[in-house]
Amino acid sequence: MSIKGLDVSEFQGEVDWERVKAAGYQFAMLRAGYGFGTVDKQFKRNASECNRIGLPIGAYWFCYAVSLQTAIQEADGCINTISGYRLDYPVCYDIEQASVAYAAGEGVTMTADLARNVVQSFCNRIESKGYYAMFYTNKNFFDTYLGSSLSKRYAFWYARYTGSFDGTNCGIWQYSSQGNIPGIGGNVDLDEGFIDYASVIKSAGLNHLSETSPVSSPSYSPSPDYITYVLQPEDTLSEIAQRYGTTVSALVSLNGISDPNKIYAGNTLKVPENGNIGSQYYTIRSGDTLSEIALRFSTTVSALAALNGISDPNKIYAGNTIRIF
């Protein structure tokens, strides 16, 4: 069985889902959010539109957990975000090298045992709430941290960008990050499904569906006009304000900061999103890695590589300027 799919996040902007469906795509995996309750800015619109036109969807949540408890908290944040929408496909935990980098920044070494237990904690929580659980990662992370025992227990969404499938035991294969799809500007991830999850989930009575469940279309309201930024040790509010074309007073007001001189690395800052700002850029500093930059700006290595034509994510150079959004 081969089912044609794709996955998107806020980095694809506003998608014309009717054109996507007309182009023959049969399911979509939507990023619902990441970390401790940060919702993807396009999720509500994407989910509402797909529900409206009857395009089956699943959801995924990016892992920034550093313990079993924080993985459960992320699962709860995911459930709170997706409740109210019809999901015919699994609820997935996305764990990658950026998850390891974040944990390291928090003083936690992400061992293979911890990575497996984090995934299990998230997926078990998802299952306990009546949803069909899945996890996502790429071949290198799978081989290094997770192993085949997890893919025997939970549904597996596997990322490997090759011309032909390698036979790995998985339900969905993400085979490209360079897709060109009508209704979506720029590159988009492409997927091939091997299991009819819509039928499996409906038959099992999961995802709070039943034989008579109508397709719901919750009303969509635009996300708040801000982006999120993870503070780094060298950051100051004045530098961040200059970088994003805003003011220190606007940052202070939006984030409830009492002392502008006291901000702390690792905290998430809301930054006003000005419609006139357009693309955002970053000048690479000595010691930077693409995964750390992706984490800092709440994006992905593949998105940065695609935007900047980077063929080898391990080769970036201090002094070069890259586009973030």
Image (tube, rainbow, N blue to C red):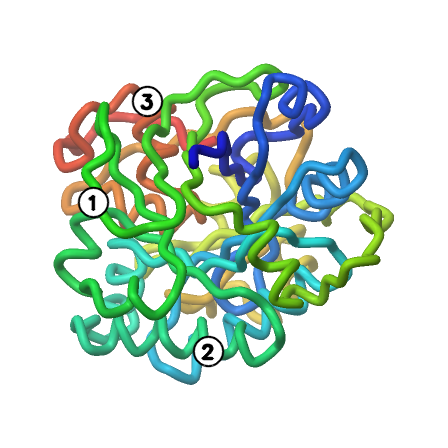
Seen from the viewer's position, the closer of residues 83 and 193 is 193
Find residue 271 and report its horizontal and vertical position in percent. Answer: 59, 49
According to the picture, the residue beneath numbered tag 2 turns out to be 124
Closer to the observer: label 1 or label 3? Answer: 3
Quadrant of the drawing holding the N terminus: top left
Find residue 58 and report its horizontal and vertical position in percent. Answer: 57, 50
Label annotation for residue 228:
none
Residue plotted at (21% across, 71% down) = 110
- Classed neighbour count for the residue bearing mark 2: other residues with Cα under 10 Å, few (<14), some (14–19), many (≥20): some
Find residue 225 and report its horizontal and vertical position in percent. Answer: 71, 44
CA separation in Å, label 1 and label 3: 16 Å
CA separation in Å, label 1 and label 2: 35 Å
Q: Say which label, 1 or 2, has the lower sequence index.
A: 2
Seen from the viewer's position, the closer of residues 252 and 79 is 79
Q: Say which label, 1 or 3, has the lower sequence index.
A: 1
According to the picture, the residue beneath numbered tag 3 turns out to be 308
Amino acid type of the residue that numbered disc 3 sits on in the rendered structure:
Asn
Closer to the observer: label 1 or label 2? Answer: 2
224 versus 107 height, above or below:
above
CA separation in Å, label 3 and label 2: 38 Å
Amino acid type of the residue that numbered disc 1 sits on in the rendered structure:
Asp
Label annotation for residue 288:
1
- Classed neighbour count for the residue bearing mark 3: other residues with Cα under 10 Å, few (<14), some (14–19), many (≥20): few
264 versus 187 height, above or below:
below
